[in-house]
Image (cartoon, helix red, strand yellow):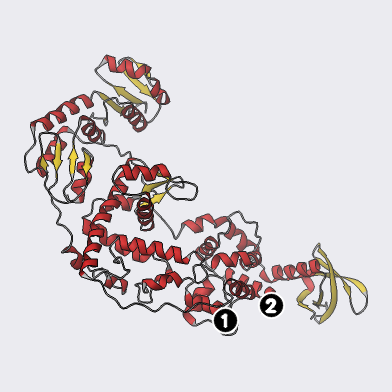
Amino acid sequence: MPETSAQRALAVSLSARSDADLARLFAERSISPSSTWRDMFDAAEALLDTASIARGLPALNRDEAAALLDAEHPAPAGVREQLASHALVGEDGLPFPSVFETAREILPSGIPDAVAPRRATSTPESTGAASEAVFTNAASVADILMQTLDAPLGRIGSGSLGATERRRLVDAGAVTTAAEADLLVGLAADVGLLGTNDRAWLVSPAGREWLRLPTLERWQRTAEALRDALPRAYRSSDGGWIPTEQWAQATPFDLEGPDRAALWIKRLVRWGLLDAAGHATPWARPLAEGGDVDTSALRELLPPEVDRVYLQNDLTAIAPGPLAPHLDVRLRSMAARESRAQASSYRFSAATIGAAITAGETADSLREFLTGISLTGLPQPLAYVIERTAAEHGRVRVTTDAASHLTRVMTDDETLLRSMEVDQSLRSIALTRTDDELVSHVSADVVFWALTDAHYPAVAVDADGRPRALERAKLAAPASPETAPADTYADLIERLRTGAEDSDAAWLERELDQAVRARSVIDVTVRLPDGSARVFRLEATGLGGGRLRGRDRGADVERTLPLSHIDGVAPVE
């Protein structure tokens, strides 16, 4: 198929696609949304450019790659549809000429033979180590999410964690090494527990919900999400995955394929889906074969969770086993965790109790919760800290005035009032004295957090004076992979569809323009006024004003032909 015919065939195919399909294709090829393409022919020409084709090849599996290296035999049915969706083959199932040439240039010797799958199975020792990895890494991911709720994890230009953030996670005990931080943050992001705002990682709404799940359910959801997030080339036809020893060769056109395969294997090993040798663990074997994960095989190997703690007079809490996640999350909102193991310890202080009250707890809710989970009652020292901190913490009240919509800051302590009025760290909220209170045009939530950061004992209250909880943690926007590319390329796609309203005329003008640029000799079929047709062999010399100019090679005269009368153009061999 000549390249010009390939461009026209692809342009017609693009016109028939939905906006969502076009957007997905453009995103896959890293097309700029501000591209100056005028119509589908421009798009087809760009997509058949060597550099663009090279960007579309790395995701292809072995069968698809083999089809592109065969210019004589059409791709099999299933492979053909996939390659057509990537704009790599025509309706006949054969690769476009530029696609074949690019594929041959990247793999001149063809595709290496696949590695034979191993038949070994897991051992009791490897199974035990994998179950320990399940418990350890589920807890590590939970710690990463908790740290991210406190403060988003900053990203550098490449999109990975910054060195400071890696160190923060290590210092907090969430991970043991910087490499582990990168691995688990990447895992959490790929399964949707973390999202991004381009500058930082944020916990997603799904991640916030995940934190409150039992450990086994946390693991199960993430295991299924990891399987679904695997690169398409690693997946098997039954919905599971191909043998892991074949992953490194699963994407022949991808130069980074072996490194990507090693990364995914590390993730599955960390999550207990594979043992250290790369074999599917007993509970993951059904998942690898396209079925559901077998949690019963894993449940027996995980340490049982507890729902009680020992509260002690030294303001600590000791969990005699892995604390149920929903209790751990709430306990950590009012106490600092000092150690993480199957038996964790937590320490209370005026600062931690104050943070809990800032987040919406009250003295009553704290007492009720702690009494409910304690095996030793509520020690007097802890009860005293709760009472004293609660009494101190509510001295500054922040609310919104219903009539003026101004934020009001109220306290019965004149000294505190004067201190806030002149505090330079509060300049951004512009507090102004009015009688016995301060007012601000800034929203009540912003004022509250500014006062809290400046260590004032503030509490947010509603119109009736009741404390209200404020959520400081900023969550990532819910992911919408199907609509996001369509939104990004909406303007470009609309322009392409508008430019393709008369595709035959657009293609004719394109062919003539190329002929003029190359000073080619072409046969031009012209429709005459009497309805007959005549072919002129011209050396194309100019195009403009709706007319083609060229020298007639037979009569040796200059001719000017209206484009509206031209029915066809053919190159002269």
Q: Which mark is residue 70?
A: 1
Q: Nearer the viewer, residue 28 or 5?
A: 28
Q: Nearer the viewer, residue 515 or 424?
A: 424
Q: Quadrant of residue 147?
A: top left
Outermost residue toward the left in this view: 376
User: Taking 109 as reference, is 421 left or right?
Assistant: left
Q: Nearer the viewer, residue 163 or 330?
A: 163
Q: Position of residue 282 (x, y in %)?
A: 24, 70
Give the residue at x 39% y 51%: 195
Q: Could one spot residue 573 in this view of the protein?
A: yes
In the image, residue 443 sits, relative to residue 479, either above or below, namely above
Lower sequence index among marks 2 and 1: 2
Q: Could one spot residue 148 in this view of the protein?
A: no
The amino acid beneath tag 1 is Asp
How many residues crowd mark 2 within 10 Å: few (<14), some (14–19), many (20+)?
few
User: Taking 413 as reference, is 191 left or right?
Assistant: right
Q: Position of residue 444 (x, y in %)?
A: 34, 30
Location of the N terminus (image quadrant): bottom right
Q: Quadrant of residue 414?
A: top left
Q: Nearer the viewer, mark 2 or mark 1?
A: 1
Tell me whether the residue at label 2 lies in contact with that at label 1, contact meaning CB atoms closer than 8 angstroms.
no
In the image, residue 515 sits, relative to residue 351, either above or below, namely below
User: Taking 459 as reference, is 379 left or right?
Assistant: left
Give the residue at x 40% y 61%: 263
The residues tagged by marks 2 and 1 sit, at their Cα atoms, a distance apart of 17 Å
Q: Secondary structure at mark 2?
A: loop
The amino acid beneath tag 2 is Pro
Q: Which mark is residue 2?
A: 2
Q: Position of residue 103 (x, y in %)?
A: 58, 73
Q: Position of residue 418 (x, y in %)?
A: 32, 15
